[in-house]
Image: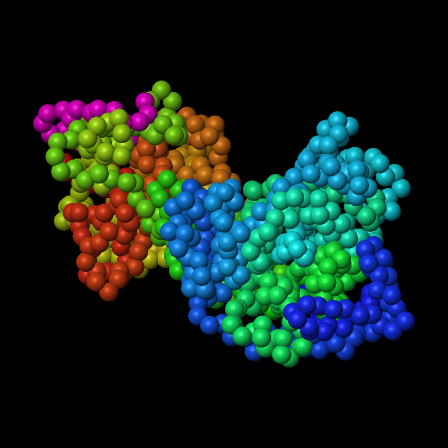
Amino acid sequence: MLSRRRRGLSGPLLVLLGAAGCLFYRSLPGQRAPSGPQRAAQEPPDLLAEDTRKLVKVLEGLRMSRRISGRRRALVLMGPHGHADTEAQLYRRVLRDLDFEIHESTCPETSGFLRHGQGESGWSLLLCLSSSEKSCLRKVAFSHLGSHQRVNLLPGLVGALSVSELCQLTVRGLPIMPPACGPAHQNQTSPRGLVRAASASSAMEAGPVGVVNTYVVVTSVRPLTAFLHDIAVVTANQMSRATRLGGFLSAKTSQEALEQTKGVIGQVLEAAVSASDEAKKPTRCVLCYQLLTFTLLFSGSITPLVTQVDAGLTLSALSDRDFDRQVTRDLILEDTLRFLLSSETQPDDEQRVFAEASGVRMPADQFLLLRDFHGHMMAPSPFQPVCPSVSRSCAATRLSDVLLAVVRHYVVGRDDQSQASANPTAGSCVDARLRQIYSDPPFTLSPPFSPNVKEYHADVTFDTLTIQVRAEPADAGCGVRLDERRGPRVSTVSVGLGRNRISILVTDGGETVVAVYTVHVFREGRPSLPMFGDHVTCGYVQDCGLRVLPGRSCGLEPFSRPPGPLPACTSGHAAGRWLVPCLGCSDTRTCDWREVAWQPDGCSHPVVERPLLQECMTRRKVLFLGDSTNRGIMYFLLERLNSSLVDWVKSHDTLVYKNLNHGRTWVSFSYYPQFWLDHKQRPTFKQALTRLLRRSGPLANSNLTVLVVGGVQWLNTKHLQAVRDVLDSESLGGVQVVVKSLGMGFHLPVDGIRSRSPKEIQQLSRENQDIISAAKHHAFEVIDTLAITVGRYQDFLPGRCACHFHQVDKFRTDPAPRTTQRGSRPDAMDPPSRVGSYHVTGAVNQVYTDILLSRLCPRT
């Protein structure tokens, strides 16, 4: 932060006298006005000239009384692929906050607003994204810009700091060491190579060691004015991180190191500009600016060497895995925009008022620079002045001396605040808002992100199975967690079909949640082409993107239905495939995926109509033992049997339903395995089954008692032997047992759960066949859910495991049949009842539940 405390000036005190539009200077009595290097080195008395105080007071008065007349217009040139770029999204958000009218275009060649936007009523800000900078430099007439127009490029500065120009400056004794200038340094061009070289050259370290990327915004070339951001990217000890520059330097040194760093940057800037013919060309771009990256090498000394200067932001040392590069880039870009634009106005009479109040007259361009520079110094920001700085001026010009006086009036006093921000503690969260939400792949939030808005919606395509999310707090003292109070700051989440919810918790730096942001992500169904004419039937067993079943084909293939009705299947694990109508089997985009259906090979599973189901289930008790996928089958059965679902809970314990089918049917459920418990406290499979049997008793030792056991991927052959042992011990060896085999899930790299590798996913087929064989040995019925879910592994519904193929929705005000997710329709035979409160959706879950019901209630 920039403090407004006043301290003494160094250098001669200036008296500013207005005469014929020129600036005149006189020294204090008895002093000679130094020039050149002497000006920066001299330490004058601790006084503030009355005339300088008056000048600053007039500038402050102008700033306080300033009013913006009309909305400013900004043009953002995004390049060929910039519309979805996160840099463009950042510019939109910040410019909206600053009350800009925003116009966007791909490039200067296609922007009519750029060609016709000159004059006071035209654009006032032109932002060229990194993908369009070269085009801007070629097409924007910088010499013809209006005095009020600002561009984020300074043409003369880019070439002046190229590698070849820096190499020429090395002969002038400047602290420059570009690795590309000499063969001796060719193997040290990487940051880590430079760090090793620095460490090797400083056996007795007197200061920091490392490569530091610092970020400088140059706001004027003549006179030279520049500011240093307090965030730097430090590469040391084989690691790169974004940190506060003062924190890195103060580890072994004092404030002197920071002043040395600013001095080195100022020297190189001044030398480059003075040596560049391009920078000396006339320009009307008075308010233009340029972001630069200075790469500095610290080798045990508090005085660094400049090894490279890049136009724009260079953040390649940071990892993209956790958005570190993007977060740091956006922070610096946002700070820069607010630093430059927050107080920008153009009242017609401001220069006249200044001249009358201060007695100082100067050319309009110089006044604009002075007024702008004063605004930068007066407003709190993360920038520190480099040219001029408190201790030196970067050029011996009259206006530079005036700017130097302004710098010395506003003394930098942010060390304590930087230290506090770098070490936030619990309870230090003052602004409990987010600064930005990041995602990969990027989604577009609706409404556009604003720190004051807590709830958003976003749509993603069917192919988006996971999203990596990170949120940044506005206040460094606040913490951010995803979904859980102690959850991660960056998380990869699975995205099921339909509605998904991502909760972002802002904490006080400890465990207390002080704000919650919610993003509702809607994942679209598989793109479909409705069938209006001729089509063919295509079948597929598994997707070529994830082969699970060895020896089976993948992808769409032509399929011919046998003539006549098919016989009923004699088991629940008959091999089969998914059928879908398409214009051609070579392109999945020509298919109507709303009509996809499961077809066993050579047989069919008749759908059990409700009257037959209710009759079949009379006096029966159905017991479910398993995880949430088994619970989904149970809820589909409840709704089909009772014509409504009046109760629903995402239980991880035991549920008992006694009043089903007009009191004639009993259904119970027990969750297994209880993975969240300590291993020693977790019930064994036999214990869980025994408790369920006894709680559901009395039980008939016949097919009037049905036990459905299974889950996603925890079941194995030992569990089936345990079922036989427990039933025999409980004198229930004659009950009907249905085994739900394995299913697809845990195949996505999601944080917080164990995910299976592609090789482990392929092992599921062998494990599944072992389960089917063991079930047949024990005379258990099997529903082969793996074969059914393999081909629809992308059609999972919300849930971290990507294994849920059902979802329970609460009815809206109008309980008419509706589509709850794209690509999945309600049961066409049994539309939701108006009596019930909930409805089970999920086409895949419906398929294997219908197979279960057909095995429990065969027509014969």
Q: In which quarter of the image is residue 790?
A: top left
Residue 730 part of the magenta-drawn span: no
- The residue under the point 15% across, 26% down is 561
Q: Nearer the viewer, residue 482 or 254?
A: 254
| Left or right, residue 570 beside residue 383 | left
- From the viewer's side, name the closer residue of 198 and 794: 198
Question: Where is 585 relative to 826, above or below?
Answer: above
- Residue 456 makes an appearance in the image: no
Dividing the picture into quadrants, the one containing residue 543 is top left
Please, what is the dominant secondary structure of the magenta stretch?
loop
Q: Residue furthest top?
A: 551
Q: Give the extent of the magenta segment.
A: 553-576
Q: In this view, does 383 lie to the left or right of 550?
A: right
Quarter in which the C terminus is drawn = top left
Where does residue 600 sit, x and y in percent of width and height?
23, 29
Q: Is residue 1 visible?
A: yes
Residue that sits furthest to the front in the current view: 20
Question: Who's the residue at 33% across and 57% down the image?
Answer: 648
Q: Position of residue 149 (x, y in %)?
A: 51, 59
Render colour scheme: rainbow
The residue depicted at 62 percent of the width and 44 percent of the height is 278
Q: Is residue 559 magenta?
A: yes
Q: Position of residue 840 (x, y in %)?
A: 28, 51
